[in-house]
Image: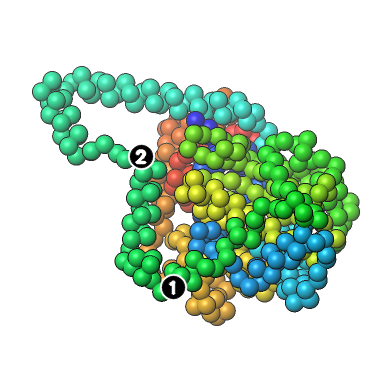
Amino acid sequence: MAVSIVQYFGKQNNKCGYCKELNRGRSHGMHAFRLTCEDYQELIDRGWRRCGMYCYKPQNNETCCPCYTIKCDALEFRLSKSNKRVMRRMNRFLRDGKREVNEQDNQMSTSANGGGDGGATGDNECEELIQLPNKAPVNIDVDQVAALAKAQQQHRRAEMIETLKKESSNTSGSAKISLSLSTAASNPPRKKAKQMRLERRQAKLGEAGTPKSENPKSKALTQEKSLRDFLAEPSDNNKHKLKIVLVASSDTQRTCAEVVHALYCKYQLAIHNDKPARLTPASMQRFLVNSPLKNEKSQVGPPMGYGSFHQQYWLDDKLIAVGVIDILPCSISSVYFFYDPDYSFLSLGTYGSLREIDFVQTLAKQFPDLKYYYMGFYIHSCPKMRYKGKLSASYLLCPETYEWFELTDEIRSKLDAHKYQRLNNDSTARDANEFLQEHLKSVKLLIDANHCTNYGHYVQLTGTCPDADNIMEYSQLVGKICALRMLYVNTMNTG
């Protein structure tokens, strides 16, 4: 089984990329040498995001511009009038080749992203607004460490099996039979996860209590054109052909091709007024290609597997846009989207986000758990960053209980009054994945290049742990599940 390997950097104070105030940005950071897709799903559900190999979590109760993780339920998503205009404009352009400029849409997209159509996708502010720490990760052989951690897991499993065998041998035959019968009675055969999900979904649909034929709203809903309806198969008579090609991030020959880098530079210069000296192939690769997520394929997952990918938009034979995404067990997380400014009239940022939602909807038909579209952070205190909340069926993550709440006008009003909000009105509610002091002994540590153990065993051997405060802080931030599953690089010994 793969293992996640991380180095915690601690608290980061830097210039805020939203209000531009010096030393007012507050976050926690860590370098991810490797992350399983399951662990990264857990992390983004606790407010973490990645920028290349760097993962960061804003300190919302201290930072000047609180950042709330936002996601869209793709199965509940409904097109707005503005969304439909964008889709129709693209379809007409593909059909007739005519360039239509809608002044209202241009103004909306410009204000949405501070100079260009950022649409609703990902952290298009990531590279500009996330100041990377000035410390470098320690130098380790990731494959060697992963093999070491795997061997330790297997050793512990063997020890557990041996312990169970000894306990079983001390039990009389009649007791074993009695135990076996009682266990079978109390633990009936478990249903397959897919069957359980199907039953839950059917039960949820049944809660409405009104057959679709008797529901007055159902007729209107069935007649409304869906996102898929707008993305009908292209006609042979169309003036232009648009093709979207999915490429794994690890395929650097395609993700780092000259044409991709040229498009990235053109976008950064025109839309973000970036400095040409910064736009090297190495910087693009560090930001948009390198990923701690390795491609993971399984029989119960999508055919392309989980991991980091690029969606390349080819208009005839020309690359006009690239969407950087992570495909995770429960979601598609938008990382970045860049496009050819010459095609701004097509509102490609918005169009890209709608295409990514359609991708989620397509995957959800076969894999019902994969139904969410993560858009990065919603920053209500920064007006130009509120555009992400315009998608229907959008939800914000409570920064204290890590539960999701629909982004309603009521929540917007609360954020107008105070930029930091708990979101969960139940004052007694707690984090279900809370890490406590009693869990600390089970945190896995990399001691040096050849040894890894848990915190409790390490303290027994050495009598102390100089990095104890950092380990506790890190564990509380990533939550109990990840803290007990990921491997913490103890820099006190490996640095």
Quadrant of residue 388 within the rendered picture: bottom right
Of the pair 239 and 369, the residue shown nearer to us: 239
**Residue at 75% of width from left, 77% of height from top?**
104
Image height of 296 relative to 387, above or below: above
Of the pair 465 and 480, the residue shown nearer to us: 480
**Residue at 57% of width from left, 38% of height from top?**
303
Label 1 crowd (10 A; few <14 / some 14-19 / many >=20): few
User: On the rendered structure, is 324 left or right of 195?
Assistant: right
Of the pair 321 and 471, the residue shown nearer to us: 321
Q: Which mark is residue 343?
A: none
- Secondary element under disc 2, as helix, strand or loop, is loop
| 1 vs 2, front mark | 1
Pinpoint residue 128: horizontal percent, then vertical percent. 75, 58
Image height of 134 relative to 26, above or below: above
Going by the numbered disc 2, the residue's amino acid type is: Lys
Write down the residue under mark 1. Answer: 217
Label 1 vs label 2: CA separation? 34 Å
Going by the numbered disc 1, the residue's amino acid type is: Lys
Of the pair 336 and 161, the residue shown nearer to us: 336
Pinpoint residue 250: horizontal percent, then vertical percent. 69, 36
Pinpoint residue 231: horizontal percent, then vertical percent. 65, 57
Q: Is residue 399 visible?
A: no
**Residue at 72% of width from left, 53% of height from top?**
235
Pinpoint residue 187: horizontal percent, then vertical percent. 23, 38
**Residue at 42% of width from left, 53% of height from top?**
434
- Secondary element under disc 1, as helix, strand or loop, is helix
Q: Which mark is residue 192?
A: 2
Residue found at the far front of this picture:
237
Label 2 crowd (10 A; few <14 / some 14-19 / many >=20): few
Residue found at the far right of this picture:
276
Q: Is residue 234 visible?
A: yes
Nearer-N-terminus badge (1/2): 2
